[in-house]
Image: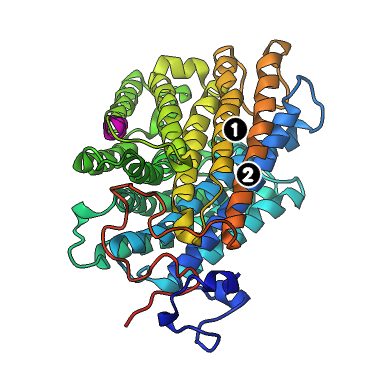
Amino acid sequence: MSSVTADHVPASHGHDDHDHKPHGWRRWLFATNHKDIGTMYLIFSFCMLLEGGLLALLIRTELFSPGLQFFQPELFNQFTTMHGLIMIFGAIMPAFVGFANWMIPLQIGASDMAFARMNNFSFWLLPIGAILFTVSFFVPGGANAAGWTMYAPLSLQMGPGMDFNIFAVHILGASSIMGAINIIVTILNMRAPGMTLMKMPLFCWTWLITAYLLLAIMPVLAAAVTMLLTDRHFGTSFFNAAAGGDPVLYQHVFWFFGHPEVYVMILPAFGIVSAVVPAFARKQLFGYASMVYATAAIAILSFLVWAHHMFATGMPVTGQLYFMYATMLISIPTGVKVFNWVATMWRGSMTFETPMLFAIGFIFVFTIGGFTGLILAVAPIDIAVHDTYYVIAHFHYVMVAGSLFGMYSGAYYWLPKWTGRMYDEKLGKWHFWLSMISFNITFFPMHFLGLAGMPRRYADYAAQFTDFNEIASIGAFVFGFSQLIFLYLALKSWNGRGEPAPAKPWEGATGLEWTVPSPAPFHTFVEPPVVK
Ligand code: CU1
């Protein structure tokens, strides 16, 4: 691969085989270069996306018709649990850290991330967590089947698969905390002269705020699962009601992590969309400062709404009212963002290449997920549809059409800069339209299933739910296989095939992220930054 990209490296850099950089597998294992580490993060997270996606397809296979066809309920619940955990901790979070590694140093004019070796350690913890998740299917009793939220008291009764899970969450949490520290220090200490905070591209801003969220919440998750661990093995009874503990305490601690976590998985996507929309509308981003303040407002509010996940636990009405109104408040800064993206496009000279299609698709479909979130915030409605497919539909509109489409937007936008090669625009558009249509075929019917009362986390269902489940399963398979188009395009560019990317791949676009000349030109893919 290096021989192919090498002809993009200007000869003046004078690199040859006698430099002091590690080659072959050592280049990756000992990587301290933010670009190589970013690449590894992105590759890793895409592998996890495929693993989590495979589990999703097994789920949809079983749910194609009522009755038990292929899997016992216990195994089915392992699939749903591990699908959630793998997608959140293996796919979405590491993917955004990969984007951060690649783009933040370039966008603020830094030579690399602040702590290059800690960066390496952050990455290499990930495969260990992934292995723990994956092998837990093969320990006695199988993987955790208690749901990705690992609610006590059920999680206290799971087999050793649960312990694998707890350990994996600890390790992945440590990786996230180190990644967050690295991003905060890089942004606060390593900006080029003149790059004030309020001049930073919004992707840096959203990640800075996300990193603070991570620092605050990952220790809380670690505390929750550590209490599970000691309840399970060391005689404590934090969550065991029979011994004086309280299972609802687990839900409080978990969702104090869990709700801000939702924003960890969406704020970086907001940053990507805020980069892509101005570029393809040929206008400056509308309302830059309000975007920064809205992001901060969302982050602060996200700590004040956790018990909207717990309306069904029997909390006092005053508590329900507070968490209901506080949750609704979040729609205001979110609405500011959507307004700003639309205002950016207003009367712009727009073109609709794949990154822009995914960005507009994001705005359109993510907003549907936002609205169903608002509906779920209404306590009486939430109690009625609690633990139904309405909730599944809601958060897949946020996590797939939000996080994943945002990432695809950024991946197509920056792929030419990362690899030096353009992707095939026609296939990119196929990827977008197949994903967009099949995503909606998969998840829109789940709103109806939920409103009709179909509960989540069951391998079987009543016969009247059959039609919408068949439709959802067909959509899921089309969606799953459509993602292979991206795999093909990304591998092709990475292997140095396809049209060479021009210096400005999106001609005529303004508001591009290259606010300052980068010390590391993007086309030196195999090179660390050249510092004279
Ligand atoms: Cu929440």
Identify the element where label 1 is drawn.
Answer: helix
Image quarter in which the C terminus is found: bottom left
Q: Residue furthest bottom?
A: 18
Q: Amino acid at mark 2?
A: Ile
| Residue 372 horizontal/vertical position (percent) | 44, 22
Q: Is residue 254 magenta?
A: no
Which secondary structure type mostly characterizes the magenta part of the structure?
A: helix
Residue 186 placement, left or right of 174: left
The residue singled out by tag 2 in the image is 485
Hey, which quadrant is residue 66 in on the image?
A: top right
Task: Please determine whether, in this image, residue 250 is positioned above or below residue 382.
Answer: below
Task: Please determine whether, in this image, residue 93 is positioned above or below residue 305.
Answer: below
Residue 324 versus residue 421: which sits nearer the camera? Answer: 421
| Residue 175 horizontal/vertical position (percent) | 48, 60
Magenta region: 337-346
| Residue 102 horizontal/vertical position (percent) | 43, 60
Residue ID at (62%, 42%): 483
Q: CA distance from mark 1 to mark 2?
A: 10 Å
